[in-house]
Image (tube, rainbow, N blue to C red):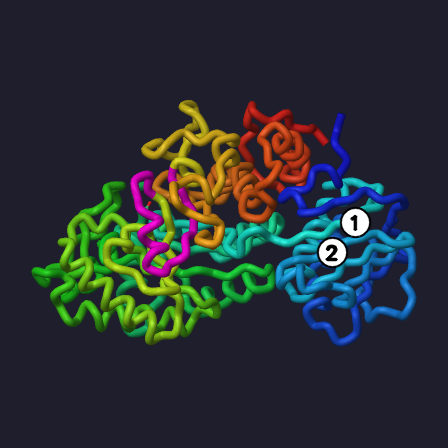
Amino acid sequence: MNKAQYESLIPKPVLLEKRGGVCSLTPESRICVQAGSTWALQAAEYLAGRLRPLTGLPLPVEEAAQAFEPGCIYFTAQGAGTELGEEGYQLSTEEGCLIIRARGFAGFFYGCQTLRQLLPPAEGPWEIPGVFIEDYPRFPWRGSMLDVARSFFTVDEVKRLLDLLAAYKLNRLHLHLSDDQGWRIMIDSWPNLALHGGSGAVEGGRAGFFTKAEYQELAAYAQSRAITLVPEIDLPGHTNAALASYPELNRDGVAPGLYRGMKVGFSTLAAEKEITYKFVSDVLGELAALTPGPYLHVGGDEAHSTKDEEYRLFMGRVQDIVAELGKTLVGWDEIIQAGLRPGDLVQIWRKDTRPREAVRQGAKLIMSPCTRVYLDMKYGPETELGQDWAALIEVEDAYSWDPVSVYPDVGEEDVLGVEAPLWTETIHNLGDMEYMLFPRLLGVAEIGWSPRQGRSWEEYRLRLAAHGPRLRAAGVNFYRSGQVPWEER
Ligand code: ACM
């Protein structure tokens, strides 16, 4: 038997009580916003944009009248307590109407996402059962990463991904913008990076780059979905596309050719050359000016061709540059060895790494263990797409772990959150991207949002089953894992 909508929410809310009554959406239903709240209005317009095509109802958005009316959806900050924070919300049915209370845009927006899941995926009746929900996230950083460097993805494809992330209350999209195979963002002071470096891709992958206007369009679209973009320029390794674009960045002054293979660790910027720092400073400066979010990800992984001493020297200079730009530095866990500064963020990915050491130096941790949430890993030995160097990751494996206990000596307060990367050596189009992310990404969303206590795979898989029809209705190409008793409608 199918579960009721309110029993199948992902991520699972902090508190849900079933109440009597129902809110029925009808041709008379309106979406009513507390006067003067632009956050509520923005979320209400978003919701109307989703529900009108789904339900065929007019659902006008207007300022709230004094009294609540049955069949209407209300957005208000009144009664939203500080315990909700910026991202939390309260959703309740009262006297036949539905009320979303929140303190900021993200809270209203997440109330909308829960409301969407309380409605059937594709066909009416458009009724919301009587519920009281109070909900807020466990971690502030809940994300995914898309490697647009090995294989490029278009603005529309990234927007599609942003919509899907938002539906599950994920709030970070990390864009891996440069690597050996390609450079994906226009930098005006070094235009060959995009013009030449952007013409490369991994074998079978797509070339291309984002103009500055396109990047800003993506950043604004992300903001409208309560998502912050985290741009990454991978340094000092993973830089063949840059080295191929400017001979002067190379130790020997000779530009290599573009690289279409899958090996890592062979390229490096020249830590001893002063022009290297002019390059880094120009690139990060333009990127910082472009991105509204507070983060600059500087990579730092697998710099196997950079000597240890050079790596420390180089990363120290990069830290200075990022600090001067007023941004928060994010790096892969190899940067621990370069020495961290308080407030740095370290993305933990390797099995043998030392998160405790990062914490001791004042950094916070983003958990991306490659054996759990590298979503380019195959589900099983038969999965055609993806790789298997870290692990085979079935849906249960991506769900049944915890960001705080996956490494020793890490506490709840040390962990900023969780992020699931998608590397694209073998993933070259939207359908393949969706197949690798879904449904594993829903589990990651729940790990990042829901309380740890009481979480169980056996309970989760039944809720996940109810999202099959929902993903299908959204046209998502997802993996029909045999571990999940998928509902048909
Ligand atoms: C990585 O997987 N090289 C961060």
- Amino acid of disc 1: Phe
The residue drawn where x is 56% and y is 24% is: 483
Name the one closer to the observer, 468 or 56.
468
Name the one closer to the observer, 396 or 190.
396
Asked whether 477 falls inside the magenta stretch, the response is no
Q: Is residue 233 above or below residue 317?
A: above
Q: Quadrant of the C terminus?
A: top right
Q: Position of residue 391 (x, y in %)?
A: 37, 31
The quarter of the displayed image where residue 75 is located: bottom right
Q: Mark 2 highlights which residue?
A: 90
Q: Is residue 462 above or below residue 82?
A: above
Name the one closer to the observer, 172 or 103.
103
* Crowd tier of the residue under label 2, counting other residues whose Cα lies within 10 Å: few below 14, some 14–19, many 20 or above: many
Q: Mark 1 highlights which residue?
A: 132
Q: Is 324 situated left or right of 428 in this image? A: left
Per the image, label 1 sits on a secondary structure element best described as strand
The range drawn in magenta is 350-370
Q: Position of residue 453 (x, y in %)?
A: 60, 40
Q: Earlier in the sequence, mark 2 or mark 1?
A: 2
- Amino acid of disc 2: Gln
Q: Position of residue 239 (x, y in %)?
A: 24, 56
Q: Are marks 2 and 1 in contact (CB under 8 Å)?
A: yes
The residue drawn where x is 20% and y is 63% is: 314
The quarter of the displayed image where residue 65 is located: bottom right
The residue drawn where x is 41% and y is 74% is: 289
The answer to whether residue 36 is visible is: yes
